[in-house]
Image (cartoon, helix red, strand yellow):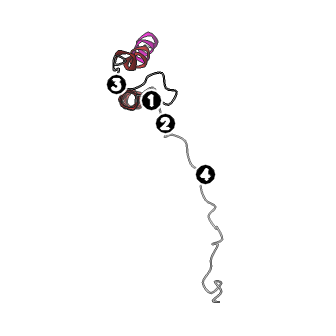
Amino acid sequence: MKRMTQGLLLTLAGLPALEANDLVADKDSPFYYDWESLQLGGMIFGGLLCIAGILIALSGKCKCKYNQKHSPLPEKATPLITPGSASTC
């Protein structure tokens, strides 16, 4: 699984280099950004992370502890607000 993830990340990192043949813009400019490739790579990476999260959640390896008992409230708990205690300004 680790090798597959590393291979996928390297492939995604190399995608912008595949479209580097565009000579229209000045690629030597320090302010040049290939926003379309960056956006596409980010969307693919985000989608893969979302799918991985769903698969991990549904795999059953992360189990919530439903058997824990919550601490019960005392039988005679004093209410914070009693009738007539609220002031009317």
Report how far apart the C-alphas of labels 4 and 3 lie in the structure.
67 Å
* Magenta region, residue range: 2-9
> What residue is drawn where x is 39% and y is 20%?
16
State which mark lies toward you, 3 or 2.
3
**Image location (x, y in percent) of residue 40:** 35, 29
Which amino acid lies under the numbered mark 4 shown in the image of this protein?
Ser
**Could you say where residue 83 lies in the image, as x and y percent from the top left?**
60, 84
Q: CA distance from mark 4 to mark 1?
A: 56 Å
What whole-number distance in Å separates the C-alpha atoms at marks 3 and 2?
A: 55 Å
Whichever of labels 3 and 1 marks the residue nearer the N terminus, that label is: 3
Disc 4 versus disc 1: nearer the observer:
1
> Which of labels 3 and 1 is toward the front?
3
Is the residue marked by circle 1 packed among few (<14), some (14-19), or many (20+) residues within 10 Å?
few
Task: Please tell me the numbered disc located at residue 33.
Answer: 1
- The spot of residue 3 in percent (x, y) is 44, 10
Q: Earlier in the sequence, mark 4 or mark 3?
A: 3
Name the residue beneath numbered marker 4.
Answer: 71
Q: What residue would you read off at disc 2?
A: 64
Q: Is residue 9 above or below residue 86?
A: above
Q: Secondary structure at mark 1?
A: loop
Q: Which mark is residue 24?
A: 3
Which residue is found at the position 34% from the left and 16% from the top? Answer: 21
Hey, what amino acid is under mark 1?
A: Tyr
User: In the rendered image, which quarter contains the C terminus?
Assistant: bottom right
Q: Residues within 10 Å of mark 3 (few under 14, many from 20)?
A: few
Up/down of 69 relative to 38, above or below: below
Comparing 88 with 77, the one in front is 88
Residue at the (61%, 59%) spot, across then down: 73
Between 63 and 29, which is closer to the camera in this rendering?
29
Kind of element beneath mark 3: loop
